Image (tube, coloured by chain):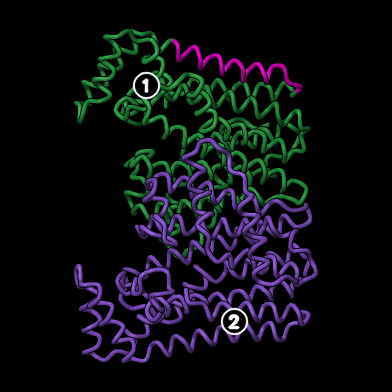
Chain colours: A purple, B green
Amino acid sequence: MLKFEEYVEAVSQAIAAIEYPTSPAALYSPIAYTMDLGGKRLRPVLTLMACDAFGGDYRRAMNQAIGIELYHNFTLLHDDVMDKADVRRGKPTVHVRWNDNTAILSGDAMLTMAGQYVARTDARHIAAAIELFNTTAMEVYEGQQYDMDFESRFSVSENEYIEMIRLKTSVLLGCACKMGAIIADASADDAAMIYDYGMNLGVAFQLQDDILDVYGDPATFGKEIGGDIMNNKKTFMLINAINRANDNELEELKYWINAENPDRNAKVAAVTGLYSHLGVREIAEQAMNDYNDRALGIIAHSKLSDEAKRSFHDFANMLMHRKK
Amino acid sequence: MLKFEEYVEAVSQAIAAIEYPTSPAALYSPIAYTMDLGGKRLRPVLTLMACDAFGGDYRRAMNQAIGIELYHNFTLLHDDVMDKADVRRGKPTVHVRWNDNTAILSGDAMLTMAGQYVARTDARHIAAAIELFNTTAMEVYEGQQYDMDFESRFSVSENEYIEMIRLKTSVLLGCACKMGAIIADASADDAAMIYDYGMNLGVAFQLQDDILDVYGDPATFGKEIGGDIMNNKKTFMLINAINRANDNELEELKYWINAENPDRNAKVAAVTGLYSHLGVREIAEQAMNDYNDRALGIIAHSKLSDEAKRSFHDFANMLMHRKK
């Protein structure tokens, strides 16, 4: 197997080599722009790693890896329209740089392109690859819809939240892993095992995202701290804060949630103070570590080679020590 | 082969039998709502007809027929967001009845569902079915993008316009025909032949749409006459009017195109008057008949059975005599 950085390099080269039609420019330029913004390329790397780990050759899974990365970036593109987000990876989002209609239409094209890449494999694997991809995509929309539903509810249970992020974020990491296993002709048990690794890692990853948004280092986080707090996002931390707050603390939370145009620094400081006081950072970190441990346990108990075990172990550790 | 009405009935039953997940309701209700609005079901009927015509059994192509109809309705759903259209088939559009974000997300889910239906076939046909579907989908986005590009241009050539509607509208009718041929194991030549029939018919169909929007009977057209004129849409008629107008007529056209909040009746009457005066109705009808004749010629010269020839002939005639 390759080193993480070598897989990233292979993915980056393949993405840079994508040939987009030149016309109509307004359709394809936003797709190239989005794919060239970069990102950690975690999902395609998982696909290549899984393919190698089960005795395939990662190059055989490259089309599927690109398809999954195209899909991931399509979801970001449409999410940014829905969230009216202006900046992504330090650059203007597509609907800001172009407009809403261009963002909708080029996103649609990106979703179809993703399906085209996933389908580019031999006749033996196409049905399973397409089925996994489409099923996962439907789950991601469901997760996104639950996330939007939660915005208009004050109270959301911890279980509802975990199920939401499982659908919105984690199944795509599970899919990325399983896709590589399918191309490598892994057994159904092995494919299910590596899916579970990716899914549990994905939950830990999203919980960490929630934590970094509040407690990340502004110097390395890459975006402004406190974005979720300002948007009243029902994160794992806000949900636990609501569930653990006494009457006075609940009043204070509601005050900030309902405040119209509050001072950013004041709101972020007040809500972060409540989080720290209520111990929700520790609860979130505990939950994150639990899911990460589950992912590591799945790998440790698998029949993978020692080299493959080390690769998936290191991948999880690398993820859990990220600063952005 | 069945009669047209029998194919429509079979499609309607299959669409009514689609089981949508119940949760999250805000994701799936708009899809069911859109599919239940009705419509002529022309594309899925073409798929079933082509399957029967090449010796298959139309029931084997039903999943692909549904997939293509889901795709068509997905494009309408997202087009209505982009065009800010409030009414579709006499009912509020999804982004009006729900909101823009719901329309974007449920449209995305509808596109993935379309791919799921297309992929539901035996291992022998899946690669060709998926490839045709995805290629066509990309062409439809390209056509939609050219249509949007034309909005900000005063002058568009007739050839550019025909290429735009070929992509935006006609290739999906070609795809619908070829999809049935693929499932029926038709030869590559036969599949290409029936694709060309569908595509030429599609161009005639879109030209007729342009004509009906101006000269349709308000009592039977189903929507307000003159919508394209009010939106300054670069239709075949406006393009020919611009190209044939003398200086005075061009001034009058520009006056109405640039008028802010013009009286609807006045604008529609004035532009329609110019069209009639410049003879562009006849030009459009001639072009429509030319494309329809090409479609009929392809069928007449094919090796299809007499029964199949009659079915595709009658389908085209039925389409060309529609009032809405």
Q: Which mark is residue A231?
A: none
Q: Position of residue A59 (x, y in %)?
A: 74, 59
Q: CA distance from mark 1 to mark 2?
A: 67 Å
In terms of depth relative to the viewer, which is nearer, A297 or B315? Answer: A297
Q: Which mark is residue A317?
A: 2
Residue shown at 67% from the left, 66% from the top: A7
- Looking at the image, which residue sits at the far front? A219
Does the magenta segment cover residue A313? no
Q: Position of residue B81 (x, y in %)?
A: 37, 45
Is A19 positioned to the left or the right of A94 in the image? right
Question: Circle 1 sits in a helix, a strand or a loop, which is it?
Answer: loop
Question: Which corner quadrant of the image does residue A218 belong to?
Answer: bottom left
Is A152 positioned to the left or the right of B163 in the image? left
User: Is B92 rendered above or below residue A228?
Assistant: above
Residue shown at 69% from the left, 82% from the top: A299
In terms of depth relative to the viewer, which is nearer, B275 or A88? Answer: A88
Is A315 positioned to the left or the right of B232 in the image? right
Q: Amino acid at mark 1?
A: Gly
| Protein chain holding label 2 | A
Question: Which corner quadrant of the image does residue A61 belong to?
Answer: bottom right
CB contact under 8 Å: marks 1 and 2: no
Question: Circle 2 sits in a helix, a strand or a loop, which is it?
Answer: helix
Q: Which mark is residue B216?
A: 1
**Magenta residue span:** B283-303
SS majority, magenta: helix
Question: Mark 1 Cα within 10 Å, few/some/many (few <14, many 20+)?
Answer: many
Q: Amino acid at mark 2?
A: Asn
Residue shown at 54% from the left, 80% from the top: A320
Question: Mark 2 Cα within 10 Å, few/some/many (few <14, many 20+)?
Answer: few
Q: Position of residue B233 (x, y in %)?
A: 36, 27
Does the magenta segment cover residue B285? yes
User: Is B229 rendered above or below residue A283?
Assistant: above
